[in-house]
Image (spheres, rainbow, N blue to C red):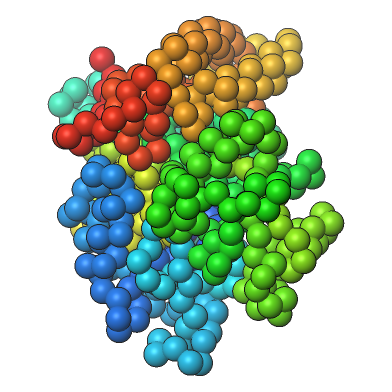
């Protein structure tokens, strides 16, 4: 098991990775590497649903327009149209796999469609209020039972293997990805995995913030590995803060779905006053960036720890039927949402930027793909429209599978083993936990919902010091999972801050007090290694 070879190596076990694996497995030997268990990615945490123009009154054009408006001028319209036009077939693919969406016998489609902020009509296909979980459970069973898919749980990728590391086999002009070095967490051993094609599907980087709706796995691994391998990275300044994360000491980053506001939930101050109409005419149904900034403004203005989301005016049986997961979790914490408002705060939720790709997931590095939240396809622009994330995973992963299946294989050279001859075991692992905490607090304090040039400069200074210390540690000691995640987090934090400092305007999710106006011309922020 020390050296392995596959047709396609997929790093990550979310919806994008599973969709790709299942669409390749009829013709290829596929390996899925995941650093925890298959079920531990962010996809399973998605509550709302998947956006698709399913009803007769809706069209892909309507979906495109809503996405473009939310993206504040930075969406790639061709990519948006591609995703919107393939949304319905992606939904039916999931249904064919066995995913059960919430039914509605009174609706023409036979399914219940909900509405979320930024959408002009009901188009969200969902499975109760735990869509991601429902989808992942079905696909995990499919993946586990597929003989052409090898699963390596408790394995974390260290770095990509590129052909320039073995110049005797490839010229510099032929640089390509050959696979990855991967740490077996349980055995502490590094194995070499080669593949004709390698796919980064590791999710986002929102664990770089102190408060996040994401699981502990969201440490920017794919973005950092792709960047270190020479890929361009785009629009990392656009970090979406979800407006409504449950505020409770024992909630552990529990998200209150966008659909609660879509079904009539109202945001209120502690005295019961509604405030969203003062910030946007769409009130609670404004896009996430606007709602998050409004909550942040009211909290800072009034010195509040949280605001409140109230949907208690709806019938109790309606709430229990439509939001069973949220209802049960809140009730367990002593909050009865049928009788009282839910305390909420914004929290880092989604990385809109990432490794620059085309609509098939191709990156700058030949035979390397990036899909899902790891990638920047141009779909989300400066602000992701609700429920477009799982949709992007499905559509782009299926397109990537078609592209990969069209490529010819080549004979791969023998790859050098991972070299541990000049490192020792770490003497003080407390350095990792201290740096981890300092980095996340720094990002929350200085690179949050509202930014200033001075705050960004302070963040950059601290990140530079942390990177130097972390890289020195990485150079001298054997790798561990915690060290690898910290190394990836500090790299992605650096990319976020550098991108934010280059954007001299306020647009979408990037709000700067020093540059409050939006420039007439919308431009992507693209970083490239020198």
Residue 52 position, x and y percent, is: 36, 70
Name the side, left or right, on which 71 lies relative to 110: left
Q: 368 and 303: which one is in front?
A: 303
Q: State the image coordinates of residue 109 (x, y, percent, origin top left).
A: 40, 86
Q: Is residue 201 left or right of residue 338?
A: left
**Residue 6 shows in this picture:** no
Outermost bottom residue: 105
The location of residue 170, given as percent across then percent down, is 22, 27
Is residue 61 placed above or below 503 in the rendered structure? below
Q: Can residue 500 be spotted in the picture?
A: yes
Q: What residue appears at the point 41 percent right and 73 percent down from the top-left corner?
A: 122
- The residue under the point 38% across, 33% down is 510
Asked whether 73 or 478 is in front, the reply is 73
Classify residue 302 by image quadrant: top right
In front of the other: 274 or 174: 274
Position of the N terminus, as image quadrant, is top right
Q: Position of residue 283 (x, y in %)?
A: 46, 55
Q: Picture quarter containing residue 401?
A: bottom left
> Residue at horizontal 40%, vertical 31%?
511
Location of residue 312 with respect to 357 vertically, above or below: below
Q: Residue at x 59, y 31 (%)?
A: 301
The answer to whether 184 appears left or right of 378 in the picture is: right
């Amino acid at each position: 098991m020390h050296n392995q070879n596959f047709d396609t190596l997929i790093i990550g076990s979310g919806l994008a990775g599973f969709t790709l694996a299942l669409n390749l497995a009829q013709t290829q030997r596929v390996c899925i590497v995941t650093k925890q268990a298959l079920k531990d990615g962010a996809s399973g945490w998605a509550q709302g649903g998947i956006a698709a123009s399913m009803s007769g009154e809706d069209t892909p054009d309507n979906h495109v327009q809503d996405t473009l408006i939310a993206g504040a001028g930075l969406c790639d319209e061709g990519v948006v149209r591609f995703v919107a036009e393939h949304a319905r077939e992606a939904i039916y693919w999931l249904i064919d796999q066995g995913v059960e969406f919430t039914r509605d016998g009174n609706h023409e489609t036979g399914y219940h469609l909900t509405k979320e902020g930024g959408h002009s009509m009901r188009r969200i296909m969902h499975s109760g209020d735990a869509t991601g979980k429902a989808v992942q459970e079905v696909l995990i069973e499919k993946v586990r039972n597929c003989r052409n898919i090898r699963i390596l749980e408790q394995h974390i990728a260290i770095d990509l293997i590129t052909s320039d590391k073995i110049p005797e086999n490839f010229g510099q002009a032929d640089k390509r990805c050959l696979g990855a070095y991967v740490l077996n967490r349980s055995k502490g051993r590094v194995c070499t995995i080669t593949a004709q094609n390698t796919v980064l599907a590791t999710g986002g980087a929102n664990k770089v913030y102190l408060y996040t709706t994401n699981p502990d796995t969201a440490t920017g691994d794919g973005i950092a590995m792709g960047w270190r391998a020479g890929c361009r990275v785009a629009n990392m300044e656009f970090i979406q803060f979800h407006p409504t994360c449950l505020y409770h000491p024992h909630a552990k980053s529990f998200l209150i779905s966008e659909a609660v506001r879509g079904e009539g939930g109202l945001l209120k101050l502690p005295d019961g006053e509604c405030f969203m109409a003062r910030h946007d005419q769409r009130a609670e149904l404004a896009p996430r960036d606007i709602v998050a900034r409004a909550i942040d403004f009211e909290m800072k203005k009034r010195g509040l720890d949280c605001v409140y989301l109230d949907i208690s005016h709806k019938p109790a049986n309606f709430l229990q039927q439509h939001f069973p997961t949220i209802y049960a979790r809140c009730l367990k914490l002593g909050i009865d949402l049928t009788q009282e408002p839910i305390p909420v705060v914004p929290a880092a939720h989604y990385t809109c930027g990432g490794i620059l790709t085309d609509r098939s997931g191709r990156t700058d590095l030949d035979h390397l793909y990036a899909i899902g939240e790891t990638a920047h396809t141009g779909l989300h622009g400066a602000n992701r429209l609700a429920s477009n994330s799982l949709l992007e995973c499905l559509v782009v992963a299926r397109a990537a599978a078609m592209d990969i299946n069209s490529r010819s294989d080549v004979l791969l050279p023998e790859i050098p083993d991972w070299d541990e001859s000049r490192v020792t075991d770490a003497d003080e692992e407390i350095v990792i936990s201290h740096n981890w905490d300092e980095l996340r607090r720094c990002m929350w304090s200085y690179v949050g919902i509202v930014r200033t040039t001075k705050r960004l400069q302070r963040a950059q200074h601290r990140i530079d010091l942390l990177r130097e210390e972390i890289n020195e540690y990485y150079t001298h000691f054997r790798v561990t999972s915690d060290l690898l995640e910290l190394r990836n987090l500090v790299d992605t934090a650096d990319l976020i801050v550098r991108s934010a400092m280059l954007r001299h305007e306020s647009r979408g999710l990037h709000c700067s007090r020093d540059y409050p106006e939006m420039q007439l011309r919308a431009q992507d922020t693209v970083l490239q290694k020198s």
